[in-house]
Image (cartoon, helix red, strand yellow):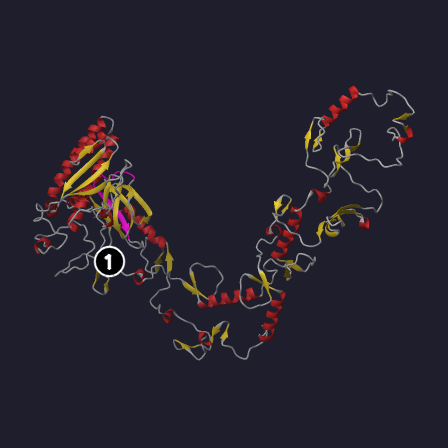
Amino acid sequence: MPNAKLLSLFCFTALNLVHVQAAQAQSSAAQMEASGNEAQYEEADRTIDKLFEIKSSSHHFFNKIGAYPSDIEELRTEGFYFGTFDTTYGTSITGSLAANSYVLTLDVRDAFIADYIAQRVNGTASDSVVTMQYGEPSQEAILDTVLSRVFDGDATRNTMEADLLMGGNNLTGVANIAASTVNADNGVFDSGVRVFSEVNLPNKSHVGLGNVENYGITDSYLGGNSNLYASQMAVTNSYNDLIATIEALTKADIGLDKVQNYSITDNYLGGSAALYASQKAVTDSFNTVNTRISNLTKADIGLSNVQNFGVTSDYRGGSSSMYATQRAVTDSHNKLDNEKVDRGETVSNADSLDGLNSSQFIRSDTNDVVTGHTEWQDNYSVRLGSSADFRIFHNGSNSHLDNYTGHLYTRNLAKGGEVLIEATNSSGSRYEGFRVTSYNGNVYGQLKYNSGLRLEATSSGATTHGNMNVTGNYYVDGQRLDKADIGLSKVMNYNISDSYTGGSSSVYASQRAVTNAYNSLNNSKLGKGDKAADSDRLDGLSSEAFVRTSRRINGKSLTSDINLSKSDIGLSKVSNYSATNDWNGTRTDLYATQRAVKNAYDAAVSKISGNEDFVQLYKNSSGLTGGDFNLSRSWRGYRYIIFLTGDDGKSEFYTKRFSEAEHDTAVALARSLGTTPRFNVISQTNRFWHGYFSSDTRFTTSEENSRLFAVYGVK
């Protein structure tokens, strides 16, 4: 600062070093820009700055602790460094102790860049690795001209010998000021009791009521007015009316008028239309049906004799475990047709064949009567149809009915007749397993077990007699059946109990339990219309909750309506003023709304510059509450910079202006003393936002207790 002679003395030595380093960096950047590699070396220059920042932080650590950190991370954990050790090269800066010195090491992935950085930090380079080694910090040269941050027994090092000129800046974080005289133009002075002045008037926020609006009060809970407070009467009336409405609700009022008050049963049989099926009933039904379906065999559907044989197109071979295709039959027919005599031709006519008269043979060209048994040996079939499409044969173990064309019909054409499929068990007993019946003029199938009926088709589906066990999943129309498919997705598979006590949330109460509970309450409780002789409570409230008519409020009897004034509730000095959104006026009988305050703030910001040219570099309408932030353009090249800040409650706002030189001088001083710059951009007492511009477009924040709204550059 121009008038800060003492600060200039403090900074003299440090600034000389910084200026030399800056000149070297600017010269190097200019050379690299001429060669087309300016981007790489701008990044290298930023890395050089980071190394010097870490070096300064380690010096400060040494001065405070008395030794360098054994782990570089201690610089951050102990609060001496607030940046990161990561670099844009994808590597990190490491630190290590070396006798009485400290070593910073960094891999920049490029040997040429490593040489460039090493030259400017007075270090060494090996391939792409930069090593920066420095000794213990020396303070002897400036001990006589600087103030010590700590007391080392020498009081003269903590004593000013000249006026401390702050140049309009703040002293922050001061616990106590001991002075013979304090002269100030304005402000707040606390000495146990807060003192207000004409420029520091109190408001409702000072008494912890900053968010309380001066609204009227109403006894009505209707209307929805957002500018009125509801009285206790309004809340009580609302509660009572709501309770009355709830108590009068019927099942129709909640959309359940068609739901019957039926009991629940675990039995899926019976067909009652006045019982709900429990989840257990549905599950048992599902398991029974699924078991029966899963256990079905080909015999259950009338195909017990049909074998799971393969097919062949070769009519030769005589296999008894293969079906012949139509091609095999055709080839066989063609061969016989070509090599044999047609059935209509006569090779030799005779009265007998093998000694048998022709009447002893079955004719194929006319209806004939067989008066004796015909026996077809094993694996020889009776073939029916023009192409032998239906065959009956016995293979020595089992009998077969094989159909090769169209459907296989088993029909009983006798009126009222039935079709039965029976089998004999290993004990010799014969039982019926399947029947197609024509009972009552209807034809339907019945599935039986040892002649006992288990499943029969009906006009609307099927009826199961007995239990149905399903071992796998039960599917309907290709979809797995679960309780959601029958509208019971929320019904739980709980047990049922006849007891109405216990309070379990995972047990259903039976009809008996409900009946017992009803009878118990009905016999021991008063009806809603009955009047109790006495009660400990009224509407759930004890007698102490009611005010007796013998009491008085502010001397006013409770035997009739009471008219209260604002004095009766301790608000005698609160005026019944209206609110306005207009901040520009002189009326003293209006309260300013939040919008009016915001408009005043916006107007102040727009006029803060007077005739100066303001350039907005950063803005956050809600107020940044902490952290680093980026500017929209460089902050350098302006007459001065203005920070617009405020408290966290957004009830107070402050401005702070400083020049580029003031900032850079303070930052250079901090670095020369081995500390991280903590430049305060707030001028208000007890408010701070510490940090510094770490680049032309970035502000690095170290700590704060306020909000940041905007940054301007003034030309």
Residue that appears at 34% across and 50% down:
599
Identify which residue, 584 or 204, lies in the foreground.
204
The location of residue 286, given as percent across then percent down, is 63, 51
The location of residue 661, given as percent across then percent down, is 17, 42
For this view, does 490 lie left or right of residue 549? right
Identify which residue, 677 or 352, lies in the foreground.
352
Quarter of the C terminus within the rendering? top left
Q: Is residue 482 visible?
A: yes
The location of residue 239, given as percent across then percent down, is 50, 66
Give the residue number, with chain letter if any, for mark 1: 199
Identify which residue, 393 or 170, lies in the foreground.
393
- Single out the residue that lies furthest toward the front: 355
- The magenta region covers 632-646
The location of residue 385, given as percent across then percent down, is 80, 31
User: For numbered disc 1, what is the local secondary structure?
Assistant: loop
For this view, does 580 lie left or right of residue 99? right
Identify which residue, 492 or 325, lies in the foreground.
325
For this view, does 10 lie left or right of residue 394? left
User: Callout 1: few (<14), some (14-19), or many (20+) C-alpha neighbours within 10 Å?
Assistant: few
Residue 463 lies, with reference to residue 562, above or below; the image says above
Residue that appears at 72% across and 38% down:
306
Q: Is residue 609 visible?
A: no
Residue that appears at 25% across and 34% down:
108
Q: Please name the amino acid that badge 1 sits on.
A: Val
Residue 638 shown in magenta: yes
Residue 659 shown in magenta: no
Quarter of the N terminus within the rendering? top left
